[in-house]
Amino acid sequence: MKNIFLNLRIIKHMNEIQPEEILRNKKLNVLTSIMIVLCSVVLGIETYFTEKNLFFIVLDYFFAIYFLVEIIIRFFSYSPKYLFFKFYEWKGNITQRKEIHFIEEGLWNWFDLTIVIISSISLLESFFEHPEFLMVSRLFRVLRIMRLLEVSKELKEVQMKIISIIPTVFCFALLLGVLIYIYAIVGVFLFGHQKFNNADFSNLENSFLTLFQCMTLEGWVDILHQASGYYHHSWFIRGYFISFIVLTVIVSFNVFVAVLTSQVQEKISASQQKEEEILMKKLNEKLII
């Protein structure tokens, strides 16, 4: 009789276990991290085999099933369930301008869910006579390696700092593209739609590519001499290339690095200040108690 009551208590306790407790289990997190690393290593080893190998096919099914079960557990750990898919929210009141804030956890959920779905679809190729369209989906397995960023807190912090400077990178790329576009148009009219070996200014597309090559500093001196030699090495023509290199390579990139460095430093300072405020708040609460 005593054993029956004991078994009933165990069953009751198991029913009371919430999915959140399963998800926060350190052993499960460690196991998932190990699986991500193993999956990354296996994908690297698989590149040395030119033909399909049964061993890798079995491992592929194993990893796909594990990550499918893991994401199902994560989904049921949310209450309400729609929070699993929430990746942004609007912050601000009526008097302030509302700003969109992205939720890191929600973004990772969408990323993981996409990889799991595509990887699972790719496993169905054996059930089709012409599975060529599914072969492309198998390539998305490589994106599982991106989950290595979830392994440690430090990697997540670096990733968040990189994401935070994406708008700045985009603005810089746009500015650089406009600058090259202007010089490309000038080059087409300046050189009269002509081509000088590697210096091709016959049309806008080729002019753009020529200037892009100059920006990488790959053979830009040869391009300068080839183009200016046709005009008796005119300093006006040389000034065109030299000014382009100075503006795009020396000035723009140095300003870009300086802006990125200052932004990252601001993010680090803000993060440290936030941690100090949280710590002081906890200390004050303890003192009040």
Image: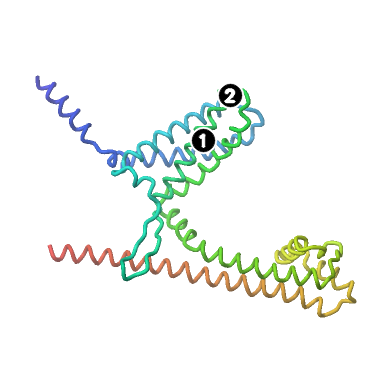
Give the left or right position of residue 243, taking residue 268 as reference.
Answer: right
Residue drawn at the location 33% of the way across and 65% of the way down: 92
Amino acid at circle 2:
Phe
Q: Secondary structure at mark 2?
A: loop
Residue, far top: 1
Residue drawn at the location 63% of the way across and 31% of the way down: 132
User: Which of the image's four quarters has the C terminus?
Assistant: bottom left
Residue, far front: 94
Residue 162 percent location from the top left of the image:
49, 59
Give the left or right position of residue 129, taking residue 262 as reference.
Answer: right
| As drawn, 113 above or below 280 | above
Residue 118 percent location from the top left of the image:
51, 37
Which is nearer the N-term, disc 2 or disc 1?
1
Residue drawn at the location 19% of the way across and 33% of the way down: 13
Amino acid at circle 1:
Ser
Residue beneath label 1, please?
Answer: 119
Q: Could you say which disc has been placed on residue 234 in the image?
A: none
Residue beneath label 2, please?
Answer: 128
Residue drawn at the location 61% of the way across and 23% of the way down: 129
Q: Check if mark 2's residue and mark 1's residue have beta carbons within 8 Å.
A: no
Residue 225 percent location from the top left of the image:
84, 71
